[in-house]
Image: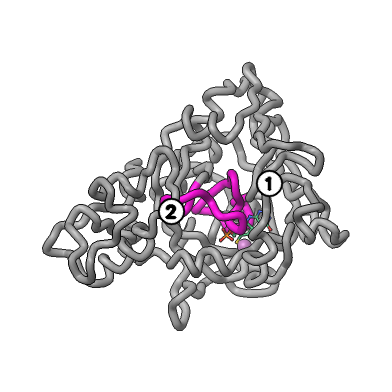
Amino acid sequence: MSPNRYKAQPIRPSEITPEHIYYSRRDFMKGFSVLSAGAFLAACSPGASNTPAPNGSAGVETAIELRDESGDPANTIEQITNYNNYYEFTTDKSGVASLAQDYQPRSSETATDWTVEVYGLVNKPQTFGMEDLLTKFTQEERIYRLRCVEGWSMVIPWTGFPLAALLQQVEPTSAAQYVRFETVFDPDQMPGQKSRMFPWPYQEGLRLDEAMNDLALLVTGLYGRELPAQNGMPLRLAVPWKYGFKSIKNIIKIELVDKEPGTLWSSVARNEYGFYANVNPEVDHPRWSQASERRIGESGRRPTLMFNGYAEDVAGLYEGMDLRVHY
Ligand SMILES: Nc1nc2c(c(=O)[nH]1)N[C@H]1C(S)=C(S)[C@@H](COP(=O)(O)O)O[C@H]1N2
Ligand SMILES: [Mo]
């Protein structure tokens, strides 16, 4: 496994094209407050963040390759923050951003602060605030593909840290087999949670060995900045080899359990949204093919890859399993 493959790669001067400069300046040089680790900005010259270089003269030190390891360019911040699935706000993908713009993280309707509780079958249950997460865990940048079960995809530069690092701190007991995640319930701020159409709060789960895989990322930032509300502020999961609905947003509880946990989507339609939900072009959704996808920003469709292109890292987790049964 080589997680470096999923990092932004510094570019040699000879490779700098206007497109690279466009990404590095437009998306990084706006002077937004950055996370303490400043992962994406590490390659930038000191002080560059507030003063964009004059046209055409972006220095070598400001150029960052925002492509995934297969060479596909990252989606723009505009695309990533204006086309969202976040049913706690609305089922309208282009309406999430405005409904979430004043959202303030807190762990319940009555709480004043946001914390995430990690508990269950562990030796050392702990509750973390955002500062704890940003200081106790080394923040990394990872450029991941996100493939929604609906048939669209994006390439997204996240900041975060491996879920495994958090789990190691709480020490799962030998009885722990699965991890259950829960989103905040806060209908005061999340109008979609007033709808009885869904069994709130949103819940998701992973098998413990999946959760320990280095690719499973707890996300704290996007494009080197704080995570926007519509993308799951303050803490969400990114499990890039699974359909997007596994990547639960706005997590307030992480529980180690001994049985496969229920999930919101499998309780809505068990035959359509299974527990594993591994991206698989050979297993169709009951109502549509999963063989291809629409990359946001591209015309036409491209083939969907087994495990969303991450087979090298994760196929071993499913050896001997029938992926048509465990879909
Ligand atoms: N709590 C919560 N998490 C969620 C969802 C949701 O509605 N609620 N939607 C999921 C789906 S279907 C997808 S495709 C991704 C979308 O993430 P993005 O909006 O950051 O691209 O979030 C996932 N996580
Ligand atoms: Mo999705």
Q: CB of residue at label 2: within 8 Å of ligand 1?
A: no
Residue 227 image position (x, y, % from top left) = 53, 51
Mark toward the start of the polypeptide (1 vs 2): 2
Magenta-span inclusion, residue 231: yes
Residue holding disc 2: 32
Q: CB of residue at label 1: within 8 Å of ligand 1?
A: yes
Magenta-span inclusion, residue 326: no
The residue under the point 53% across, 42% down is 218
The residue under the point 45% across, 72% down is 303
Does dot 1 land on a helix, a strand or a loop?
Answer: strand
Can you tell which quarter of the image residue 119 is in?
Answer: top right
Specify the farthest residue to the top: 123
Bounds of the magenta span?
Answer: 221-248
The mark found on residue 204 in the picture is: 1
Q: Above or below — where is 28 with respect to 111?
A: below
Residue 24 image position (x, y, % from top left) = 31, 61
Residue 149 or 47: which is nearer the viewer?
47
Specify the farthest residue to the bottom: 300
The residue under the point 20% across, 53% down is 61
Q: Above or below — where is 8 with respect to 165?
A: below
The mark found on residue 96 in the picture is: none
Left or right of 198? Residue 210 is left
Specify the farthest residue to the right: 196
Q: Above or below — where is 283 with respect to 225?
A: below
Mark pair 1, 2: CA separation? 32 Å
Does dot 2 land on a helix, a strand or a loop?
Answer: loop
Can you tell which quarter of the image residue 19 is in?
Answer: bottom left
Label 1 neighbourhood size at 10 Å, few (<14), some (14-19), many (20+)? Answer: many
The residue under the point 29% across, 61% down is 52
